[in-house]
Amino acid sequence: MPGVTLNPDEITALMDAVQDGRVKADRPAARGAAVAYDLTNQDRVIRGQLPTLDAINESIATGFSMALAGRTRLALTVGSGPASQLKFGDLSSLLAPPATVCVLSLGKAGGQALVVLEPGLADKLIAAALGEKPTKGEGDEAAPPPARGKRELTQVERGVLKRLLGLFTDAMTHAWAPVLPFKPEVSRFEADPRLAVIAPNNDAAVMCSFELDGALRGVMQLVLPYTAIEPVKKALMSPPKAANDSDQGFGTRLADELLEVKVQLRALLGKTTLSVRSLLDLEPGAVLTLGTSEGVPLPVFVEGRGKMTGQPTVVGGAMALTLDSGPVRELRRPFEQETTHPLPHAA
């Protein structure tokens, strides 16, 4: 109990009782199990989605789809999926044969990247580029799976596939230009996954998926090192900007719609100031003297804002205005001094 002091005899008696088991000693609370933590682990977590990166991938898919369809003369489309994160150590199953692995050089902006074509897709692309038409059912789920094992590309096949993937790298360069100056180029093809390792297993990677559909079907993955895009992480996490090259069509349509908007155009003949008494004395036939001299250009207003000047005239029996200047900068100049005039009556 707090505040109680035991003398030496009582302390001795208490210790004897604890040793004999007559008094149970309080046991410390059990601690949780220890967990090993690797301080050298370089795992990184992308917090939140990357809408700008998804927009970039959509732009890549659009550009690659148009270029590939024109090159192969086939009706096909390319779609993009949301980006995901994983460690390079988890890519072993993705890089295993018979998948085709291409190593890209990103230029000075950021090291290397990988393009992984699912089994059979490389053969379909090469055949299409050489003019062979897809057979019935090719690319469908009913088609037989490709044979397992390594698939060594011939020199000709490497050259053809390199040109096709060059269309992808061109689209990638264009889409990434507003964010990062990537200059991707096809460096080499690797049949052995161990030779396709471009970063330590603990390093993070961002994987972007592109799916071909139509005359050719298949999936290709773009694997970017997280270190390559980390400098622009904030830009990738923010919403994509509306003003970029991919929105030129929208901008053109918007401009066309704006040109069709109807606006009010008005010319001011002049103005004067009246007292309330004079206003009440107005009768039909009264003449109002305006504070405008003859020959002074009349201001022309567009939606209430002075933009031009012109001279009054008559065309085909109707009043008209001949424009003689550009935007009006000093609208009040002809009417700076407004006076009250008596209203002469018409004879």
Image (cartoon, helix red, strand yellow):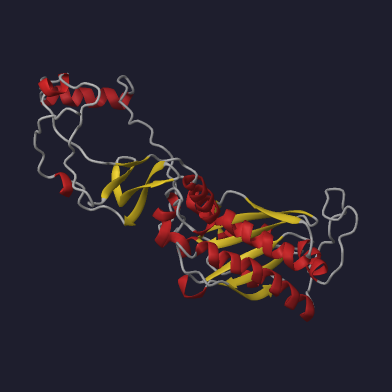
Picture quadrant where residue 74 is located: bottom right
Residue 294, horizontal then vertical, whole percent: 21, 49
Relative placement, left or right, of 259 versus 198 is left
**In the picture shown, does residue 347 fall above or below 88?**
above
Name the side, left or right, on which 29 lies relative to 2. right
Quadrant occupied by the N terminus: top left
Q: Is residue 163 left or right of residue 175?
A: right
Q: Is residue 40 visible?
A: no
- In this picture, residue 161 sits left or right of residue 186: right
| Quadrant housing residue 147 | bottom right
Is residue 224 visible in this depiction of the protein? Answer: yes
Residue 8: x %, y % from top left = 12, 26
In the displayed image of the protein, which residue is found farthest to the right?
A: 136
Q: Nearer the viewer, residue 173 or 198?
A: 173
Q: Which image quarter holds the C terminus?
A: top left
Can you say whether 245 is above or below 16 in the image?
below
* Residue at position x 10%, y 30% in the image: 342
Q: Position of residue 242 (x, y in %)?
A: 46, 51
Q: In this orientation, which residue lies closer to the viewer: 253 or 345?
A: 345
The residue lying toward the viewer, choosing from 148 and 321, is 321
Q: Residue at x 12, y 45 (%)?
A: 336
Q: Give how far across and how far down residue 87 sits, in percent.
A: 54, 57
Q: Residue furthest bottom?
A: 155
Count of marks overlaid on the render: 0
Closer-to-camera residue (289/217): 289
- Residue at position x 80%, y 63% from top? 124
